[in-house]
Image (spheres, helix red, strand yellow):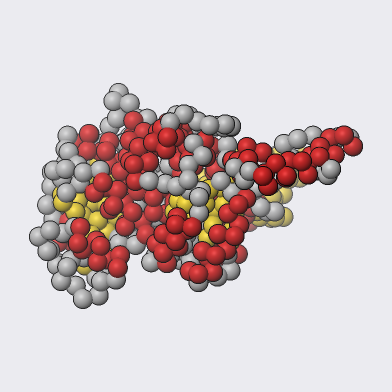
Amino acid sequence: MATVPSVSYSITVRLEVPAGGKAVSLLTHAVESAGGVVTALDVNTAGHDKLRIDVTCAARDTDHAQAIVDQLEAVEGVVIHKVSDRTFLMHLGGKIEMKSKVPLRNRDELSMAYTPGVARVSMAIARNKEDARRLTIKRNTVAVVTDGSAVLGLGNIGPEAALPVMEGKAALFKRFAGIDAWPICLDTQDVDEIVRTVQVIAPGFGGINLEDISAPRCFEVERRLRELLDIPVFHDDQHGTAICVLAALTNALRVVGKDIADVRITMAGAGAAGNAVLRLLLAAGARSIIVCDYLGAVHRGRDDLDESLRWIAEHTNAEGYSGDLRGAVKGADVFVGVSAPGILTGDDIATMADDAVVFALANPEPEVQPDDAREHAAVVATGRSDYPNQINNVLAFPGVFRGLLDAQAGGVTQEMLLAAAGALAAVVTPEELGPNYIVPSVFHPDVATAVAAAVRESAGGRARGFTEA
């Protein structure tokens, strides 16, 4: 539940009140007395005796929204006509659409866009498949693929329930990088079926963005698709998160005057995101890391290690610490959480080193309450939009794919991820850098272009062909 009213739970109440008197001020007072925030108040129709008014307000959650409606209804003379959840209204009919880029106004244009003219283009591609990048949407199109097994913080809710999230992802691709993306929600969680399905649809896309597929399945799916396909395969929950965390940590360490090679890092979370963050931090020069999962520290002596955990044990925790997360946090310079809500307290953060950095990224409820962490840490970041330093994957994936598509890259390398993180960190200028500003806003105009340029250069230099961004 949100602690303060949020636009995520915004409602519009259409109601009728007596004309004249204090009707309007009573409505505002009713919302505020219920703990809501009025964001708009519009007179829909007016008459001599009655006013029809749309009251838009923000609530904390659905129960709070109902409490606001009840309070409005209790105002003398008020008649409630309709209550609309603005978030659901935004999703009615879906959030994305397909549009034609060419006019189809007459027979001539139709004959070039479709038959018979299109046959010449198809035959050209049949002779040289690489021409598909030049003559079709392939050069600017990404498939956003999920099996619905790890959707946001909601868990295994299935492909239909994942569709609104994948639509949103496609909308972000378009908004921030001019990329045409399409949600592909698969009704299977079998690795072989996922891999084969993506393999056979790949000719129509310039890149594959894997999304919300649970670990450890996601590791195998990504590995096999990268071996099979000649287009980039990018698992955003892993690599998008890792890019953003490294960029934010780069700047946070600048704020506190520490070097990544010298700090002690404790991580909570050994799943898809945690694994990728760990690997990129090590590639960036981190040398002292302890990773904890729900059983405690990952170390060589544990007898429950699968392949992924075994890799973690072999590359971290050199001293063999075998205790719990709270013990691992003591004396650490950095905490990175990509795990579960409420697993640490402010008192735990107080045991960290001076000028500590805390990234509590579980969403919507972080590993430690940000206000509690701020009492003891020098820099605090979360995944939430209602606190400074929001670490959000939209900072990374649009620019990464823009660079990959422009370079006509055949894959994704660790060097590209490091380049993307460095470019993202550099968007924050030395004059802007501070404890409450270590990553730029997702709406900063330089974010996608800077990340795209870095990825494009790492992938082979200048852009080839078309870009909308």
Considering the image in quadrants, where does the C terminus appear?
top right
Residue plotted at (56% across, 46% down): 206
**Residue at far front of view:** 127
User: In screen coordinates, is 266 left or right of 97?
Assistant: left
Q: Which residue is found at the position 85% from the left and 39% from the top?
A: 111
Q: Residue furthest bottom?
A: 303
Q: Is residue 297 above or below residue 403?
A: below
Is 381 drawn above or below residue 165 in the view shown? above
Q: Is residue 283 visible?
A: yes
Residue 65 image point, x, y percent:
55, 56
Q: Nearer the viewer, residue 440 or 385?
A: 440
Q: Nearer the viewer, residue 164 or 44?
A: 164
Residue at x 24%, y 61% (from the top left corner): 312
Which image quadrant: the N terminus?
bottom left
Residue 262: image location, x then y, percent: 13, 43
Q: Measured from the top left, where is residue 102 in percent x and y?
A: 75, 35
